Amino acid sequence: MAVVVNRRAHAIATVVILVVLLALAVIWVFPYVMLLLTSVKSQGFLLKHSIFALPDKIYLSNFVDAFVSAGLGRFVKNSFLISVVKVPIGILVAALAAYSISKHSFRGRRVLYFYFVIGLAIPIQVTLLPLNILLRDLHLLNSLAALFFPYIAFGLPFQIMVMRGFFLTVPNELVDAARIDGSSEARIFVSIMMPLAVSALAALVILDFLATWNEFLMALIFIQSPRNETLPLGLLYFQGQYSTRWNLLCAGVVLGILPVLVVYFALQRYFTAGIYSGAVKQ
């Protein structure tokens, strides 16, 4: 009798969990469905009907209009350029720092690690004014270089923390054996540590590409020239003083999401393993 009751309780708990998970999935997916539906509606339809109304006609031309009317091609190019240059360079710098801190014994390495990680507690907002003055004095304002260096600096704390956590899971005996065999530190880093860290690197590429691609605040402050504006700034052109072209704005957002999805699906099999790779040993 007790076995039957336990099975019933287990079955009920399973059903409840599935229902809750299904409800959470619907809540999570709903905004994306509304975004996609709005992107294929006409502006007139949006003004006459509820936002939840299904479109009477699919306007795929909204994507072409969004790309052409606001010149999204220029903004996508700028975002893509800053992302493909900044992401690998930033992760490489973080990996080099994490390798030195985790696999070399030198005085003050814990202080150095703390110095890097404390950057996670510094809000970006409090750095905007000094950064603006610094970039102005360096004549970098209104250029993509004005975003490149701050993006790298603000990405390093989290990246170093993740890479250090992963490198600590690599046995020191493996590194010591390579050194005894005559391998240089550069050879050990390139041929041993980096191949072992593929999962962690892939996770950081996804997260860093997403953060760089979607960054808005620093781009808004440091870039005033339309020629160098990134995609998040370009989407502002769909908003006027008295009205917003919601269908083209949503179409532009959908186009902006596509590169992130491509990067995610290309590296998703490494994502979970990479996030938890540094949680084994500290």
Image: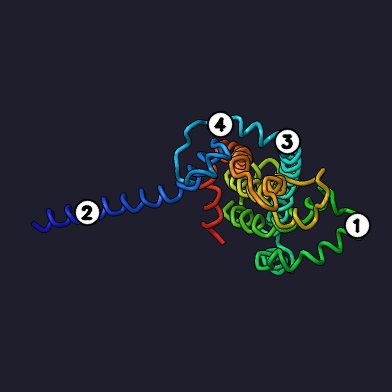
Q: Which residue is mark 1?
A: 138
Which mark is first along the chain, 1 or 3? 3
Where is residue 222, by image quadrant? bottom right
Q: Is residue 264 above or below residue 24?
A: above
Tell me the element at label 3.
Answer: helix
Q: CA distance from mark 3 to mark 1?
A: 29 Å
Among all residues in the image, which is located at the extreme front?
Answer: 48
Q: Is residue 88 visible?
A: no
Q: CA distance from mark 2 to mark 1?
A: 65 Å
Q: CA distance from mark 3 to mark 2?
A: 53 Å
Tell me: 54 left or right of 206.
Answer: left
Towards the viewer: 66 or 21:
66
Mark 3: amino acid = Gly
In the rendered structure, are the residues bearing label 4 and label 1 in contact, judged by CB atoms less than 8 Å apart?
A: no
Viewer-nearest of labels 4 and 3? 4
Q: Is residue 28 visible?
A: yes
Tell me what residue is drawn at x 8 percent, y 56 percent: 1
Viewer-nearest of labels 2 and 4? 4
Q: How many marks?
A: 4
Q: In the picture, which quadrant includes the C terminus? A: bottom right
Viewer-nearest of labels 4 and 1? 4
Q: CA distance from mark 4 to mark 1?
A: 47 Å
Give the image location of residue 171, x and y in percent: 58, 52
Q: Residues within 10 Å of mark 2 (few under 14, many from 20)?
A: few
Q: Which residue is mark 4?
A: 59
Which mark is first along the chain, 4 or 2? 2
In the rendered structure, are the residues bearing label 3 and label 2 in contact, judged by CB atoms less than 8 Å apart?
A: no
Give the number of the disc on residue 73: 3
Tell me what residue is drawn at x 48 percent, y 44 percent: 49
